[in-house]
Image (cartoon, rainbow, N blue to C red):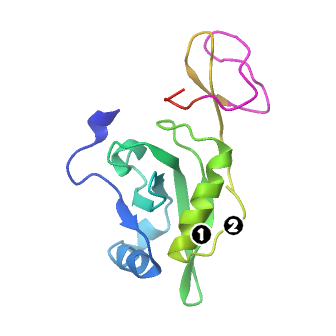
């Protein structure tokens, strides 16, 4: 996946509302209606990239605390987070990674929901090692039929 990382393909580091305002000023009105790719780096800082960007490219190939998609709306005189998910098949973050996203958004000064508005449950099959998205609490591997663990196990360092 690191082939997606090219010079200049990493996400824009956003650590303040001023940086966020500068970043949105460089986006078209149409682009601002779409979700964006995001990661929270191991430094706890939010990074944003266009939706078609790979999460690993947004992160510059580095490990992350969370990753997914995020949408913003303009309300009165400020931007707020309208939707967010942990949908990243590159990193497969646990839904518990919301705490890191919340901390990064709070550091920027963006109002946010209390959790991911769309949660994706990822598991790695212990039988065939494939990554799965669990739907409707059906913890069965779609590739080999093995039972999937009930707890998150996709951490590449595990």
Q: Where is residue 83 drawn, in percent x and y?
A: 62, 62
The stretch drawn in magenta includes residue 22:
no
Quick one: 86 or 66, which is closer to the camera? 66
| Residue displayed at 46% across by 51% down | 42
Instruction: Please give the range of residues in magenta.
Output: 134-153
Residue 113, numbered label: 2
| Residue displayed at 46% across by 36% down | 90
Q: Residue furthest bottom?
A: 77
Residue 51, numbered label: none
Choose top left, top right, bottom left or bottom right for residue 56.
top left
The stretch drawn in magenta includes residue 144:
yes
**CA distance for labels 1 and 2:** 7 Å
Q: Where is residue 21 drawn, in percent x and y?
A: 41, 80
| Residue displayed at 34% across by 46% down | 57
Q: Which residue is mark 1?
A: 81
Ranked by sequence position, the earlier of labels 1 and 2 is 1
Disc 1 and disc 2 in contact, CB within 8 angstroms: yes
Disc 2 packing (10 Å; few <14; some 14–19; many ≥20) = few
Q: Where is residue 104 drawn, in percent x and y?
A: 54, 64
Quick one: 57 or 101, which is closer to the camera? 101
SS type, badge 2 = loop
Disc 1 packing (10 Å; few <14; some 14–19; many ≥20) = some
């Amino acid at each position: 996946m690191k082939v997606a990382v090219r010079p200049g393909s990493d996400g824009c580091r956003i650590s303040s509302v001023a940086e966020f305002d500068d970043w949105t000023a460089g986006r078209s009105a149409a682009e601002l209606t779409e979700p964006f790719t995001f990661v929270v780096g191991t430094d706890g800082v939010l990074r944003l990239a266009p939706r078609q960007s790979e999460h690993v490219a947004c992160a510059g190939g580095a490990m992350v605390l969370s990753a997914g998609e995020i949408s913003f709306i303009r309300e009165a005189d400020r931007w707020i987070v309208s939707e967010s998910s942990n949908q990243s098949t590159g990193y497969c973050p646990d839904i518990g990674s919301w705490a890191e996203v919340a901390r990064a958004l709070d550091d920027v000064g963006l109002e946010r929901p209390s959790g991911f508005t769309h949660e994706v449950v990822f598991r790695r099959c212990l039988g065939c090692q494939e990554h799965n998205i669990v739907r409707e609490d059906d913890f069965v591997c779609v590739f080999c039929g093995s039972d999937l663990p009930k707890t998150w196990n996709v951490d590449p360092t595990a």
